[in-house]
Amino acid sequence: MALEAVMQQGEAETAGSAARPVIEVENLSLTFETADAPVYALSEVNLTVNAGDFVSFIGPSGCGKTTLLRVIADLEHQTGGTISVNGVSPEEARRARAYGYVFQAPALYPWRTVERNVMLPLEIMGMTSAERQARAARYLDLVNLGGFEKKFPWQLSGGMQQRVSIARALSFEPDLLLMDEPFGALDEITRDHLNEQLLRLWERTGKTVVFVTHSIPEAVFLSSKIVVMSPRPGRIIDVIDCNLPADRTLDSRESNEFAEIAHRVREGLRAGHSYDD
Ligand SMILES: Nc1ncnc2c1ncn2[C@@H]1O[C@H](COP(=O)(O)OP(=O)(O)OP(=O)(O)O)[C@@H](O)[C@H]1O
């Protein structure tokens, strides 16, 4: 029942929000001043993420993927240009709990059970115990962890821990999910499985997702839009629309359509890559 409610909410959002911009970035730059020399982490970045988009940032190490995600989340501040999230500043969006953030590592508290980890943001929000319990059950079910509520994080595999952190990010029901290489440390089989689950979750809920990855197949499989970035200075060099059929499965990775998009991403990465250093 809870799942249906989430699905209906998602369907309504998707249907009524064809091209509503959620994130708007204009001429954004970010330079870190360091002891030796300034680091030009982002330069002249322009990007629009619409409601219901699944946008991946892909690019070599150091091209600014995490920095851009952190600017959206108000964890870093740009030194030039503008950004809005839901039409307001990232700070206001953060205060309004506009997004859930999933880090590279699950970042769970080892002394709290799975359920109590998911309930943590809800406690901070002052939600009642009954409501917290209902939310935790709903979102643990959604990531297929029903029955693991009373376990501790160290009793779960890495993939399961990452699913707990996704449930926690979903628990306060943000429309926007920011995910920084959430599956980067997992083995390929687990990663494939979580990719499929995330795709189904996105389809069911209609949430807007911004996702950082190093993996071309992961980006092509999941995304509606792929943002290819290049370093020194970090910038966007291509934005690729990626509209594979909604009912795609991991086997779709063998289709010609998939190969063509992957090829374009690879070309973009090659064009932006310097082999001089
Ligand atoms: N707090 C900081 N102070 C100084 N330099 C920083 C800081 N944070 C990031 N950088 C630099 O900014 C650049 C972009 O870093 P960022 O972590 O965004 O890259 P990335 O594309 O996410 O890399 P990776 O794929 O390795 O995670 C890098 O050169 C990095 O060293």
Image (cartoon, rainbow, N blue to C red):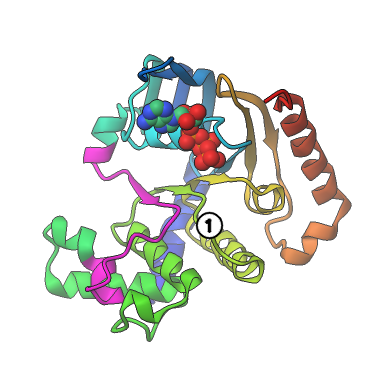
Q: Residue furthest right?
A: 256
Please give the name of the residue rendered at 44% of the width and 62% of the height, measured from the top-left corner: 8
Q: Residue furthest bottom?
A: 147
Quadrant the N terminus occupies: bottom left
In the image, what residue type sits under mark 1?
Trp
Task: Give 13 or 266, whichever is nearer the viewer.
Answer: 266
> Within 10 Å of the Cα at label 1, are there few (<14), some (14-19), or many (20+) other Cα atoms?
many
Residue range in magenta is 94-119
Task: Give 249 or 150, whichever is nearer the viewer.
Answer: 150
| In the displayed structure image, the side of residue 213 where residue 16 appears, left or right | left
Please give the name of the residue rendered at 39% of the width and 23% of the height, measured from the top-left corner: 83
Write down the quadrant of residue 252 in the picture.
Answer: bottom right
Residue 101: in magenta span: yes
Residue 1: in magenta span: no
Can you give x and y, in whole percent of width and height, for residue 147 in the image? 38, 86
Task: Give 120 or 201, whichever is nearer the viewer.
Answer: 120
Position of residue 92 relative to residue 166, above or below, is above
Write down the quadrant of residue 197 in the picture.
Answer: bottom right
| In the displayed structure image, the side of residue 220 where residue 46 appears, left or right | left
Can you give x and y, in whole percent of width and height, for residue 224 in the image? 63, 44
Please give the name of the residue rendered at 73% of the width and 55% of the height, measured from the top-left corner: 245
Question: Which residue matches tag 1?
Answer: 202
Residue 22 visible in rendering: no
Write down the quadrant of residue 240 in the picture.
Answer: top right
Q: Is mark 1 within 8 Å of ligand 1?
A: no
Can you give x and y, in whole percent of width and height, for residue 61 in the image? 58, 37
Position of residue 218 relative to residue 189, above or below, is above
Please give the name of the residue rendered at 56% of the width and 64% of the height, measured from the top-left corner: 186
Quadrant the C terminus occupies: top right
Residue 6 visible in rendering: yes
Can you give x and y, in whole percent of width and height, for residue 39 in the image? 46, 20
